[in-house]
Amino acid sequence: MERLKEFFYSLPRIVVVSLYKLIVRIRVVNYKRIPLNSQVIFAINHVTGADPILLMAGLKKKMVFFAISDDFKTKFTDFFFRKVGNAIPVFQKNFEKNFASFKQLIAASKRKDCCFAVFPEGKLNKTDKYDDFKKGAAYFAYKTKIPVIPVYIQGIKGYRKGTRIEQNKVSEGIFALVLNIFRKINIFIGNPINPMAENVINDLSNISDSQSYRVFVDDIHNQIESNYSILQDEACELLKDPQKLALAEKN
């Protein structure tokens, strides 16, 4: 019964993602950097509202996305983000409301076939300058001890900043899906960042010193930013060399 219920709940997303696979050319580079049979947190640049659909179609993973609570204001947007985008609201101001969201995340974290996805910038960014990452991905990695993998989306087309369509995330996402029909979009996978690497001996969950907690979160956050910059440079070099790009695509 639970599986049947989950299937019908996921049906809108399954239909949209399956159709998108057929009409968009998605190339995933260095896919083997994603550990097999292991949960990860994908930290992704955010270009359009269509990004979650693109990622689910390209990476072929069950993913739970973090989205700001403002995206769930109306019944339509709530349906779109939950049922199609498989997103969970995160409240940035009223933290008490995050209790229900955390319960959903905890339930999802128990499923080993489920990964998580975070847009560290917390907003759409049409430029190639990514220097305002929030610490949500680092904090979640610290709490769950799940590795973080930077992901760089390149080649996706969206409406320019400031237009009326761009200001509405759902409309922007729907139109972005249409704009990218038959386009070739690249998804570059970075190297995993292990939140336990700097503290193999001590269990992070037992740390009581708030200053130590901040140090670990800041360290993970800095690694995400650094690895993302490295990934973007790597992507630029590969795009200049079709042979190397083709080889990386096989990996």
Image (cartoon, grey):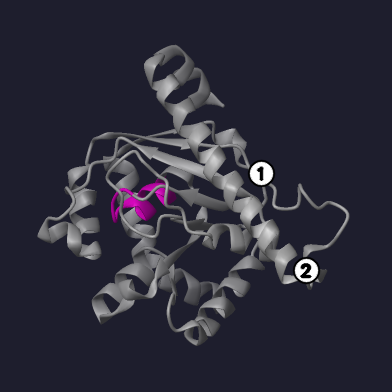
> Could you say which quadrant of the image residue 90 lies in?
bottom left
Mark 1 element type:
loop
On whether residue 49 falls in the magenta region, the answer is yes
* 248 over 76 or under it: above or below: above
Closest to the camera, between mark 1 and mark 2, is 2
For the N terminus, the quadrant is bottom right
Q: Residue at x 44, y 77 (%)?
A: 91
Q: Nearer the viewer, residue 153 or 22?
A: 153
Q: Position of residue 129 (x, y in %)?
A: 36, 41
Q: What number of labels is visible?
A: 2
Q: Is residue 151 above or below residue 71?
A: above
Q: Secondary structure at mark 2?
A: helix
Q: Is residue 219 visible?
A: yes
> In the image, residue 169 lies at what x, y percent?
25, 63
- Give the left or right position of residue 48, taking residue 196 as reference: left
Q: In the image, is 122 to the left or to the right of 146?
A: left
Q: Is residue 236 above or below residue 131?
A: above
Work out which quarter of the rendered image holds the C terminus and state it.
top right
Q: Residue furthest right?
A: 201
For disc 2, the marked residue is 205
Q: Which residue is nearer to you in this view: 201 or 26?
A: 201
Q: Residue at x 55, y 40 (%)?
A: 226
The amino acid pointed to by label 2 is Ser
Q: Nearer the viewer, residue 26 or 90?
A: 90
Q: Main secondary structure of the magenta part?
A: helix
Badge 2: how crowded within 10 Å, few (<14), some, or many (20+)? few
Instruction: Specify the farthest residue to the front.
Output: 211
Q: Which residues are magenta?
A: 47-57
The label shown at residue 36 is: 1
